[in-house]
Amino acid sequence: MDLSVNEFAQISKLQSRILSLYLAVRFSTNSYYNQDFNQALQYLEEVENMFKDMHQKAAIGVVLNNKGEILRGDANKNKTHRDKEVSRDAYSGAARVIQQAIGNAESQLVLNEKKIEAVDERRKKKGIEPGSIQDRPYSDVERPLRRRALKLLSTLASRQNNLCVC
């Protein structure tokens, strides 16, 4: 296999990003379980910026959800040591971030539904009956989109539940 210098540089850059993501997520997780919420948030900021650079909307949603959970964990940890106003502000911050994660899942769901509608429109335009032999290429595209919709709905429900416990 003969790789050009440019291809090698791209592969090297991707490998570096994957390693950086892995380390940041791992350190964030360790910090969270050690109840060092500030450090966990710093690592997640780094991860979020990397995912933004790569335009990974689903991953950004996961990061936002995790940040909200970390903020909620911090509010829970410190609620006995703070006055009610400070505690309320801490939970409000967690709720705001979780609402962003919910918005992220909703926008992905809308985009996915538009893709399903486009497949259906093409099918109808060609006069193809769903379930027919001619429908196979369309159903092969539609099936994973419908599975993704179910996964997104589950994600949305989970994030809404996270918001409820704030």
Image (cartoon, helix red, strand yellow):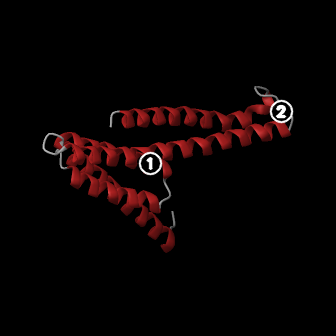
Residue 21 found in image quarter:
bottom left
Q: Is residue 84 left or right of residue 130?
A: left
- The single residue placed furthest to the left in the displayed view is 81
- Whether residue 4 is visible to the viewer of this picture, yes or no, is no
Residue 32: x and y, percent? 23, 45
- Is residue 80 shown above or below 14? above
Binning the other alpha carbons within 10 Å of mark 2 as few (below 14), some (14 to 19) or many (20 upward) gives some
Residue found at x 52% / y 37%: 152
Q: Name the residue under label 1.
A: 100
Nearest to N terminus: mark 2 or mark 1: 1
Q: In this view, does 7 lie to the left or right of 45?
A: right
| Number of disc labels | 2
- The single residue placed furthest to the bottom in the displayed view is 5
Amino acid identity at mark 2: Ile
Residue 76 found in image quarter:
top left
Residue 88: x and y, percent? 27, 44
Q: Helix, strand, or loop for circle 1?
A: helix
Residue 164: x and y, percent? 38, 33
Binning the other alpha carbons within 10 Å of mark 1 as few (below 14), some (14 to 19) or many (20 upward) gives some
- Disc 2 to disc 1, C-alpha distance: 40 Å
Q: Helix, strand, or loop for circle 2?
A: loop
Residue found at x 36% / y 63%: 16
Q: Name the residue under label 2.
A: 128
Residue 165 found in image quarter:
top left
- Is residue 154 shown above or below 50? above
Residue 61: x and y, percent? 44, 47
Q: Which callout, 2 or 1, points to the residue nearer the camera?
A: 1
- Whether residue 33 is visible to the viewer of this picture, yes or no, is yes
Which residue is nearer to you in this view: 41 or 151? 41
Residue found at x 61% / y 33%: 146
